[in-house]
Amino acid sequence: MKTKITFLLTGLIGGLVCVMPGPLLSIFTLTWGVGPAFFVAVVAGVIIAGARSHLLANVLRYIAGLVVCIITYLLALVVFAAVDGFSPDWCGFSPSDNFDQVGIDVVLGLLAAATFAAGGIALFAFVLTGRWSNSLLARLLMAGVVTIIITFIVNYPFHSYWSFFGMLLPLGNALFCYLVGSQIWQQAGEGRQAS
């Protein structure tokens, strides 16, 4: 359990690093910072927890994993923007004035982005472990939904950058990193039982 907490904490720190530059640098950190920060958080968790021996990862797999993380978060942002932007026209409701107002358009955008991100992070785990897991994908989807709900609750009274991104990114990264770490340790346990 202690090793899984390591992944949770490294993910939390990775999310906080992306939020700390504040609203002035948010465009850069949200587009180019989240994917690499998540990758570094997982790799740091692997190193700290001593899980390198449980992975099939070599230098090429780590490079591929970094690319998958970068592309996943960039495309999740594009998916969010598309659904957030077009959903008022598709569904006939008025758009939110700002993302931190968390109207139905923002919620639909976040759900679409979380779904895309869950698939990408499941692919990232596959790259590192050499094993696809539908269970991990389902848990990542649930973590995305939980993150959106908690972000909405925390942001509701404040409607600010800090209450929105300050909850969304650290919590989302922490939960996703925890689940990837759990997958690594689950696979390690199965490997020990097979030998």
Image (spheres, rainbow, N blue to C red):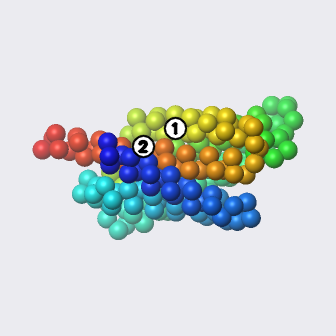
Whether residue 123 is visible to the viewer of this picture, yes or no, is no
- Coordinates of residue 139 in the picture (x, y in percent): 46, 36
Q: Is residue 174 above or below residue 50?
A: above
Q: Looking at numbered disc 2 in the image, what kind of residue is underneath it?
A: Leu
Callout 1 environment at 10 Å: few (<14), some (14 to 19), or many (20+)?
many
Q: How many marks?
A: 2
Image coordinates of residue 170 in percent, x first then y, are: 56, 50
On the image, which quarter does residue 70 sit in?
bottom right
Secondary structure state at the residue bearing disc 1: helix
Which of the numbered marks, if any, corresponds to residue 143? 1
Q: Secondary structure at mark 2?
A: helix
Label 2 Cα neighbours within 10 Å, binned few <14 / some 14-19 / many ≥20: many
The answer to whether residue 119 is left or right of residue 26 is: left
Mark pair 1, 2: CA separation: 9 Å
| Left or right of residue 7, residue 160 in this image | right
Classify residue 45 by image quadrant: bottom left
Instruction: Give the amino acid type for the residue marked by disc 1 in the picture.
Output: Ala
**Residue under the image location 70 percent in, 65 percent down:** 25
Q: Position of residue 90 (x, y in %)?
A: 80, 34
The outermost residue toward the left is: 195
Q: N-terminal of the two: label 1 or label 2?
A: 1
Number of the label disc, if any, that sits on residue 179: 2
Specify whether 14 is left or right of 91. Answer: left
Q: Quadrant of the C terminus?
A: top left
Picture residue at 58% right of the left edge, 39% below the top: 147
Residue drawn at x 78%, y 41% as measured from the top left: 101
Q: Vertical placement of 95 versus 65: above or below?
A: above
